[in-house]
Amino acid sequence: MSTIGNSIPRVDAIAKVTGKAKYPGDFQFSDQLVMKVLFAHRAHARVLAIDTTQAEAVEGVVMVLTAKDVPVNEYGLGVNDQPVLCGPDSSIQGADVVRFEGDQVALVIAESEAIAAKALKKIVVQYEDLPVVKTLGEALREGAPILHSRLDSNIFHHNIVRRGSTEEAFRICAVIVEGEYQTPVQEHAYLQPESGVSFVDEEGRITIVTAGQWAHEDQEQVTHSLGLPLEKIRIIYPAIGGAFGGREDMSVQIILGLAAQKLNERGINRPVRIVWSREESIIGHCKRHAYTMKAKWGASAEGKILAAECEIWANGGAYVYTSPKVLGNATLLATGPYEVPNVSTDAYAVYTNDIPGGAFRGFGGPQAAFMAEMQVDKLAEALNLDPVEFRMRNLFKEGSTISMGSQLPAGVTIRQVVQKCAEEAGWTQGPDGWKKPELVPAEDPNIKRGLGIACGYKNIGFSYGAPENCGAIIVLEGGEEIEKAKLFHAGAEVGQGAHTTFAQIAAEALDLSLEKLELHYSDTSNSLNSGSVSASRMTHMAGNSIIGAAKLALERWQAGDRPAVGSYVYRPPATSKMDKIDGHCTPNFTYGYVAQAVFADVNIQTGEVRLRDVISVDDVGKAINPTQVEGQIEGAVVQAAGYVVLENWKKRDAKAQTKEFSTYLIPTVLDIPDRTRPVIMEFPDPIGPYGARGMGEMPYLPFAPAVIDAVYQATGYRFHSFPLTAERVLRGLGKLKPEVSGFWDYE
């Protein structure tokens, strides 16, 4: 029986629901030491001196580490612009400067957490405070402090897209609409904060057990900072309590490796454990980027988009992290899933002293989709066209050309997806086009009802010429028949059910029962590089790698090998970098498509926004495990609902004010939509494993503009920023004084 398309139980389900699954923070050893971090708690300062004498004198303290102890004191997923530890006497120039409050200054390794905490307080650090760059406006003003001396400004990345002539196109537009938009910071809110354990194993390798999204990249970054050969570092991922993109970037990996290295040099071979508090997690790790955007779009009287000008500013915070990659997605998606013949887009990433912006589910897509879909709604209204009708006149189709001048890969289904979503929400299609349904008014006159719709698309896999590959190893054992198949794969399980999907694909490719599979996951010592669990890529990339390894293993089995080993690295069609002049390129090798409709109630007296019903239609190509796909859709909707309605990040002078879940509110069961309806469409992707597309990020993309449009339909006020807290809604409705922050001062 085929395993593909069946909702088999997750391979880790029993362990997780019974508490047997071990997360990084669950690892305990009888002889373990404990490490704690001294964070800077300053937004911008130079570390003049660090005195660790008193801390080292505390009974039970084994070691205190500072910048001088780091062999190569730098790291970064994109650019090595962040010190491992900030302080004087570093191996890297400029590492004595603290650039955000979560920069790490010193490490204490002790017999217990209480002792380590006591010693932290006895470390004396002499700082010279430096001017704090709090906003984009401050970062961009003439004479602003330059946060990284390798540059002559705080702009560290700039994307340009030019297609056709927007100037000429605007002259013939029947309508032109403009807008300024802001999207907020969002906290990842992992189930388990950053944690892990490190030790030197029996083969002399520094072994780090932690949570991440790309084990081999973690290995490479640790290797670089510790100045060791690659084979001396081993990364293991156990159970992971959520990732959402944020665990792509380093948190405790390097310092755990450093601790094991320095202890070993002193002849101390004991495990070291660290578990961050929630506050440490919030200040010490990256967030979703805050974006500030401007747009000017025009359309013909017949309802065809003729031109789009977009300006995007990403607050990158103190270090690069994944900002250029996130900005790359936003640059492409700034014009949405629409045929736009004339495009001018400029997108910038800017240093400030904020907590760094990093990868987050959607990877620049939610921010760009918000701007694009808001502009589409405005154009539809200006032309007195139904929002679905207007979209249908402009949506991509097979063979469409994107803003970057290349044709979309085969398998373009956005029209089918939008049509299905509209029908599910009650739209009807007649001779005059699409027509929106009439909503039944609420009994309470203070409750106003609205229905919004939005759509989007997003890449699957790495973009813009980034090396893209994924490896798998399968070992077949037995005599006359295959008795056991071992699958070795590095792809991380971050709650999305990836390892179950891998098992289903392997069983299908080998024509074996799942019971004959032995699964070995997320260990750099026995697996090939899988790439990151991000960009909705893992089902596509891992699936194709597993199918390739299975084919080779079966060939070796037929040739008589016992055991038979198949090792395969899958490489998808090539992408290309943006041209520096016009941005033209082939940015991605395949895409996913999504549309959402949101029914919302707005209480015009209290400002409360209630999400009554959410329809999310996703083309997944082929649902390997339909229940897991539904879970991904429902989870994305809940997380996006928090982003759009509830989660209100606050800071002052570039320092977080919402450092606990008592002040930074994430959705509870009382806050999530009353009903979420996942609608799975299956149009096989031409190059996907068994036709599957990636989809983990797709349900996030159009949610914000769909909610904003529903609120607009309910109240007549169109919000250009969110979250839609009660205060912001009441300000918009004129019941409280309007916000006074300017365009460049958005925080």
Image (cartoon, rainbow, N blue to C red):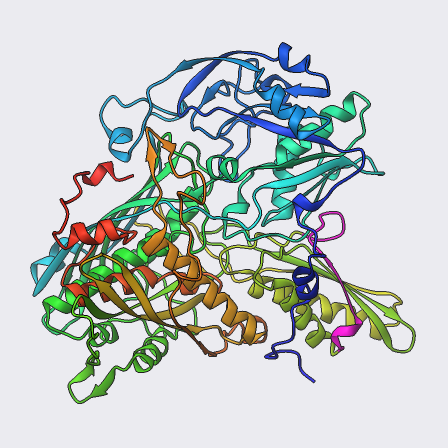
Q: Quadrant of residue 45?
A: top left
Pick the residue in front: 411 or 148: 148
513 inside magenta stretch: yes
Q: Residue furthest right?
A: 479
Res. 246 visible in picture: yes
Report the quarter where the N terminus lies. Answer: bottom right
In the displayed structure, does residue 618 sit left or right of residue 272?
left
Q: Residue furthest bottom?
A: 431
Position of 324 relative to 711 (above/below): above
| Position of residue 127 measured from the top left corner of the image (x, y, whole percent) | 45, 14
Query: What residue is rendered at 58% in x and 37% in y?
Result: 276
Please provide the residue range marked out in magenta: 512-528
| Position of residue 165 measured from the top left corner of the image (x, y, whole percent) | 18, 55
Query: What residue is rendered at 21% in x and 64% in y?
Result: 376
Q: Quadrant of residue 515?
A: bottom right
| Position of residue 6 measured from the top left corner of the image (x, y, whole percent) | 61, 79
Report the quarter where the C terminus lies. Answer: top left
In the displayed structure, does residue 392 sit left or right of residue 279?
left
Position of 100 relative to 567 (above/below): above
In the displayed structure, does residue 590 sit left or right of residue 429?
right
344 inside magenta stretch: no
| Position of residue 595 measured from the top left corner of the image (x, y, whole percent) | 35, 70
Pick the residue in front: 131 or 379: 131
Query: What residue is rendered at 7% in x and 58% in y?
Result: 171
Query: What residue is rendered at 85% in x and 74% in y?
Result: 482
